[in-house]
Image (cartoon, rainbow, N blue to C red):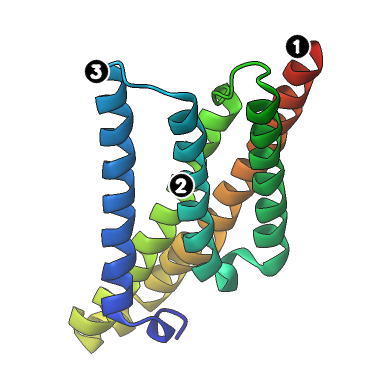
Amino acid sequence: PFAQSFSLLLTFALVWLMGIGLLSDYLDGHLARKYQSQSKLGAFLDPLADKIFYLLIFWFMIPVLGKTLFFLTLAVETLLMLQRVVKLSLGKGEIKANIFGKVKAVFQFSAIFSFAFGLLLAQLIDIYLPLEYRWQYNELIIKSMEYLLFILPPFLATVALILSLASLIGQIAKFKKS
C-alpha cells in the first residue's frame, strides 16, 4: 500500500535524479581537482548544492523518516552552512568538509538509495510477480519491504544526523582555534 502511493514514474524519477546528482557532484569535484580550478566560492557552493539535493529528497521521504528526523537534519545542515558563511565572510580558516562530513554524505546517500531501491522493488513486485507467488512468499516479501522502506532508511539517516552533529562540533572547535 505505501509503495502504491508513489507512482512508478516518480520512483524512476527519484532514482534518475539521484544518479544525475551524484554523477554531476563527482564530475565537478574531479574536474576542479584535475584542472586545479578549486576556489573558495566552489568550496562553498558545492556543499550547499549537496545539502539542497539531499534535503529535497529527504523531504519526499518524510513519510518514512518522520518529521522530527527531517527537521533535525534540516536544522543541523543549516547550521553547518551558516558556520561556512561566517568563516568565508571573516576569511578565517578553510571551509573544507571534515571526515565526519564526508562519511555523513555516504550515509545520506545510502538512506536515499535504500528507500528508492525498496520502493522500486515493491512496485515491480506488485506489477510483475504473479499473484500465486505473492501469496506463497507474502511474509518474506512484506518483511523485506518493511526493512528496505521503513527500517534501513531512517537508521541510515539517523547515523548521518549524528555525523552531521559531529562535523558541526568539529568545525566550531576548529573555528574557535583560528
For the point 28% across and 78% down, the residue is 8
Please state which of residues 90 and 49 is positioned toward the viewer in this rendering. 90
Please state which of residues 41 and 162 is positioned toward the viewer in this rendering. 41
Please state which of residues 60 and 87 is positioned toward the viewer in this rendering. 87
User: Eyeballing the image, is 161 above or below 62?
Assistant: above
**Residue 34 relative to residue 114: left or right:** left
- Mark 2 or 3 closer to N-term? 3
Spot occupied by residue 94 in the image (x, y as percentages of width and height):
59, 18
**Callout 2, which amino acid?**
Ala
| The furthest residue to the right | 176
Q: Is residue 63 visible?
A: yes
Please state which of residues 146 and 96 is positioned toward the viewer in this rendering. 96
In this figure, which residue is indicated by the disc labeled 2? 49
- Mark 2 or 1 closer to N-term? 2
Q: Do the residues labelled 3 and 1 touch (CB within 8 Å)?
A: no
**Callout 1, which amino acid?**
Ser
| The furthest residue to the top | 177
**Callout 3, which amino acid?**
Lys
Few, some or many residues within 10 Å of mark 1 (<14, 14–19, 20+):
few
Spot occupied by residue 71 in the image (x, y as percentages of width and height):
70, 60
For the point 72% across and 43% down, the residue is 79
Checking the image for residue 34, the label placed there is 3
Distance from the alpha carbon under mark 2 to that under mark 3 = 21 Å
Q: Is mark 3 on a helix, strand or loop?
A: helix
Spot occupied by residue 97 in the image (x, y as percentages of width and height):
55, 26
Q: Is residue 121 visible?
A: no
Distance from the alpha carbon under mark 3 to that under mark 1 = 29 Å
- Mark 3 or 1 closer to N-term? 3
Q: Is mark 2 on a helix, strand or loop?
A: helix
